[in-house]
Image (cartoon, rainbow, N blue to C red):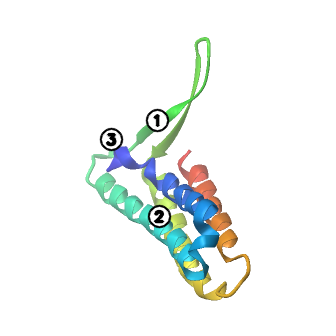
Amino acid sequence: MLDLIWLIPVLPLAGAGVNLILGRRLGDPKAGWVATLATASSFLVTVLAYFEMLGLPAEERSHVVKMFSWIGVGSLQIDLAVLADPLSIVMALFVTGISTLIHLYAIGYMHGDAKFSKFFLYLNLFVFSMLMLVLG
């Protein structure tokens, strides 16, 4: 599961992408449920990674997953990667768990709003940004 930690920030980004493309067609509650499902899925992956990390010896609890090579100039290579260590996974648990609860609350709170799908698009982009800050 630690090899799949790249999914933790990518799932909310995918939810934002779905709401960007299909948000208005999905309508009022469905766009919110798509965003909530993406964030809850990210929380589930984080929980699974946390419990896998607990089973590892202390010296093996730092895990880096390279997503792709961002900049390569001569011998300089800058990669986009995510780091899973005990601190970053616990922080990702807070971000994804609380964000899922905020999404659930916002579905009812934003009901009937003209910009319902746009709100959840921005909310998922915010969750993605927070997760990249924590895991990057």
Viewer-proximal residue among 7 and 52:
7
Label located before the other in sequence (2 or 1): 1
Badge 2: residue crowd in 10 Å (few <14, some 14–19, many ≥20): many
Looking at the picture, which amino acid does disc 1 mark? Answer: Lys
Residue placed most toward the observer, 131 or 71: 71
Q: What is the total number of numbered labels drawn onto the structure image?
A: 3
Query: Where's residue 100, x and y in %?
Result: 51, 73
- Identify residue for label 2: 93
Which amino acid, by three-letter code, is at mark 2?
Leu
Left or right of 25: which side holds 119?
Answer: right
Q: Which residue does the numbered mark 1 point to in the structure image?
A: 66
Q: Residue 121: image x %, image y %?
A: 64, 65
Circle 2 — which element? helix
Badge 3 marks a residue whose secondary structure is helix
Quadrant of the image occupied by residue 28? bottom right
- Which residue is disc 3 drawn over? 60
CB contact under 8 Å: marks 1 and 3: no
